Amino acid sequence: MQDESLGFVGVGRMGGPMTHRLLDAGRTVHVFDRSEAAVAELAQRGARAAASAADVANNADTVFLSLPNPEIVQHVALGPGGVIEGTRVKRVVDFSTIGPRTAGIVGDALAARGIAYVDAPVSGSVAGATNGTLAVMVACPKPVYEAVETLLKTFGKVFHLGEKPGQAQTMKLANNLLAAAALVVSSEAMVMGVKAGLDPQTMLDVINAGSGRNSATQDKFPRAILPGTFDFGFATGLSYKDVRLCIDEAETLGVPMVVGAAVREMLAVTNAVYGGDSDFTSICRVIETWGGVQVRG
């Protein structure tokens, strides 16, 4: 696949750094995004600007998608001027988090046109996209996986979860529920401790040396909450969307999510108070307001 041309639709916070990694590897990449500035920045690095998603798919054998929600993915992949209209595309690799239902719809529609669909959501934030340390969760038929595996390793560690589109989405939703839940409950514990007079850095040191350590206490609190920057790199609106998709899927499968529903409501409050573009570590700011203290160090 080294000689094949690549395309990338959606070159924003995640797609931009991922495209940079492809360019660094010497690959030809055709790019499209609604943001002209994002496309221009990549064009300066040697990417080829495209006029539409279909234009990307006219010039690329493999087209990557990194888009914010199921509706946009479905429109970009299957709508007018979408990838499905491309004359060259052989496979679509979708890094978006869209849930199993939409993955199935998109995968079936593309397959009907002879285009392979690779369900491949990622985890690891902007830093992981930049450094090539993402977890890449993949669901597609084994021969398709073998064709893209080496290419996907450009972005991080690759896990093949099954052959059915949507299986990787389920894994991603479970992962993101856990990440959000850890942040919510850690925020509650930290605010309680600070209000009781404990030093927040000492609290983190104790928690991370003991059984309470988790991704929030080990990474998000030291990086974005104690400094008061709230800039971990994942938007509240996206986290809220992912947790809603997770609970919807759980309900479809008949799996109760009592705690998950509480996490969803905390994200709903954070989204309403600070906006969807805020960093999802702003969850702690909500609990700080309720508790009347700040967790800083």
Image: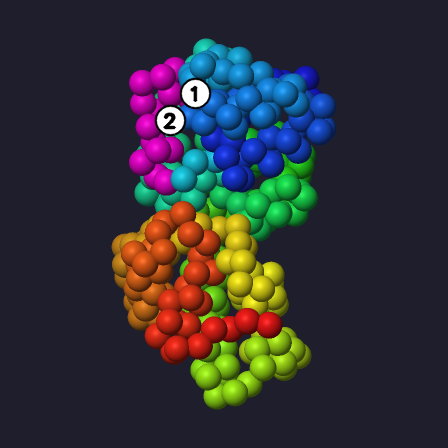
How far separated are the C-alphas under marks 2 and 1? Answer: 7 Å
Please state which of residues 118 and 142 is positioned toward the viewer in this rendering: 118
The answer to if 21 sits in the magenta stretch is no
Contact between labelled residues 1 and 2, with CB atoms less than 8 Å apart: yes
Please tell me whether mark 2 sits on a helix, a strand or a loop.
Answer: helix
The residue positioned 36% from the left and 17% from the top of the image is 81
Tell me which corner region of the image, top left, top right, bottom left or bottom right, holds residue 80.
top left
The residue positioned 53% from the left and 17% from the top of the image is 49
Percent position of residue 124, x then y: 57, 50
Label 1 sits on what residue type?
Answer: Ala
Please state which of residues 237 and 99 is positioned toward the viewer in this rendering: 237
Please tell me whether residue 47 is drawn above or below residue 164 in the rendered image.
above
Q: How is the image coloured?
A: rainbow
Please state which of residues 64 and 116 is positioned toward the viewer in this rendering: 64
The residue positioned 49% from the left and 16% from the top of the image is 50
The residue positioned 62% from the left and 47% from the top of the image is 128
* Residue 245 seen in the current view: yes
Residue linked to disc 2: 76
Q: Quadrant of the N terminus?
A: top right
Percent position of residue 263, x then y: 36, 65
Q: Determine whether, in the image, residue 286 is placed left or right of residue 11.
A: left
Q: Which residues are magenta?
A: 69-85
* Residue 215 seen in the current view: no
Instruction: Give the prevailing secondary structure in the magenta stretch.
Output: helix
Percent position of residue 288, x then y: 41, 72
Residue linked to disc 1: 53
Percent position of residue 114, x then y: 43, 20
Please tell me whether residue 249 is drawn above or below residue 112 in the rendered image.
below
